């Protein structure tokens, strides 16, 4: 069985975590398969968006603990797994030069929840839940959890989610600003595909500059961010899609964006 299913659609790719019997929890093979699938999408000039979802009744429940059980008298040191697998994945998702959409079709727990939060747009089924389950086993939120949570929902709610490890329903996650939108279960994938099809025909280079600017804003001063906006706007205005967008607006027609940079 392929641990990650890859589907190529016009202008975007769909990556489906595919260990439904284990609620799509990560083992070594799934780590490797997802890394390769993301790298392949990044190298494909025709790919202008990425959709990440899960097979079966879960999005992802983080690390498959049975994949790294210690023998009697041994210890499992977890920092290496983060350095080798999770941290590079989070960095890649944030740095991809096109939008990444997560369609959370069920429970997203532990690192699975934080992989979803590293995506640019998070859609979730109404029945989905987000759980920072780490505290239940004496660990800390990883895979960017301690970075994303306070920035998305504020420190008070971030502390509650991290320390109590209580499930957060999709509708409340939307109300709190953790995700973009909660959607009826039956409509989730249709909405996710519509969104990716929209991005596949959008001014991709400009969207990549938006991603870069928003990512930088968390650490920049106002002066630094103003300078970044100036430089990014200059680059965007030199790209063919800006000229096409203005021309389409002036002539009251639909733009034909190529997604290319200058």
Image: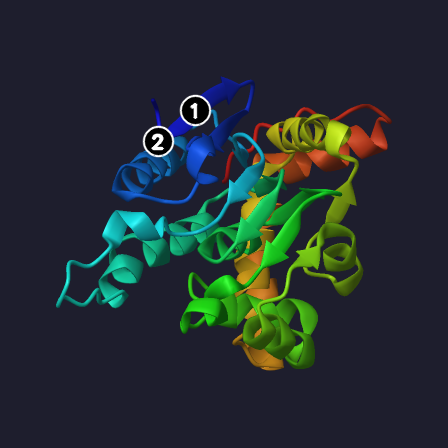
- For the question of whether residue 111 can be seen, the reply is yes
Closer to the eye: label 1 or 2: 1
- For this view, does 87 lie left or right of residue 199? left
Circle 2 Cα neighbour tier, 10 Å, few/some/many (<14 / 14–19 / ≥20):
few
- For this view, does 70 lie left or right of residue 237? left
Q: Residue furthest left?
A: 73
Q: Are marks 1 and 2 in contact (CB under 8 Å)?
A: yes
Q: Determine whether the residue tagged by mark 2 lies in a helix, strand or loop.
A: helix
Residue 210: percent from left, percent from top: 60, 53
Please tell me which residue is depicted at 63% across the width and 31% down the height of the picture.
Answer: 196
Q: Quick one: 55 or 230, which is closer to the camera?
A: 55
Quarter where residue 151 is shown: bottom right
Q: Quick one: 173 or 261, which is closer to the camera?
A: 173
Q: Report which residue position mark 1 lands on.
A: 6
- For this view, does 255 lie left or right of residue 220? right
In the depicted structure, whether residue 42 falls above or below residue 89: above
Marks 1/2: CA–CA distance: 10 Å
In the depicted structure, whether residue 255 falls above or below residue 34: above
Q: Determine whether the residue tagged by mark 1 lies in a helix, strand or loop.
A: strand
Residue 40: percent from left, percent from top: 35, 31
Q: Report which residue position mark 2 lands on.
A: 40
């Amino acid at each position: 069985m392929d641990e990650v299913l890859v589907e190529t659609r016009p202008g975007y790719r769909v990556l489906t975590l595919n260990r439904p019997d284990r609620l799509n929890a990560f083992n070594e093979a799934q780590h490797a398969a997802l890394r390769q699938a993301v790298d392949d999408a990044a190298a494909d000039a025709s790919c202008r968006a990425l959709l990440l979802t899960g097979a079966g009744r879960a999005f992802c429940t983080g690390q498959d603990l049975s994949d790294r059980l210690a023998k009697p008298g041994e210890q499992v040191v977890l920092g290496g797994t983060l350095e080798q697998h999770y941290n590079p994945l989070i960095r890649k998702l944030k740095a991809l030069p096109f939008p990444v959409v997560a369609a959370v079709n069920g429970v997203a727990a532990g690192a699975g929840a934080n992989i979803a939060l590293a995506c640019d747009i998070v859609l979730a089924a109404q029945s989905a839940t987000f759980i920072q389950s780490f505290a239940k086993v004496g660990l800390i939120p990883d895979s960017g959890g301690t970075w994303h949570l306070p920035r998305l929902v504020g420190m008070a709610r971030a502390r509650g989610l991290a320390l109590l490890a209580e499930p957060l329903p999709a509708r409340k996650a939307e109300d709190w600003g953790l995700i973009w939108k909660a959607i009826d279960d039956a409509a989730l994938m249709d909405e996710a595909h519509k969104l990716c099809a929209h991005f596949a025909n959008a001014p991709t280079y400009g969207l990549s500059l938006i991603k870069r600017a928003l990512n930088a804003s968390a650490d920049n001063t106002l002066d630094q961010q103003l300078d970044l906006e100036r430089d990014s706007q200059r680059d965007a205005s030199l790209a063919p899609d800006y000229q096409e967008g203005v021309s389409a607006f002036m002539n009251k027609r639909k733009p034909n964006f190529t997604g290319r940079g200058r």
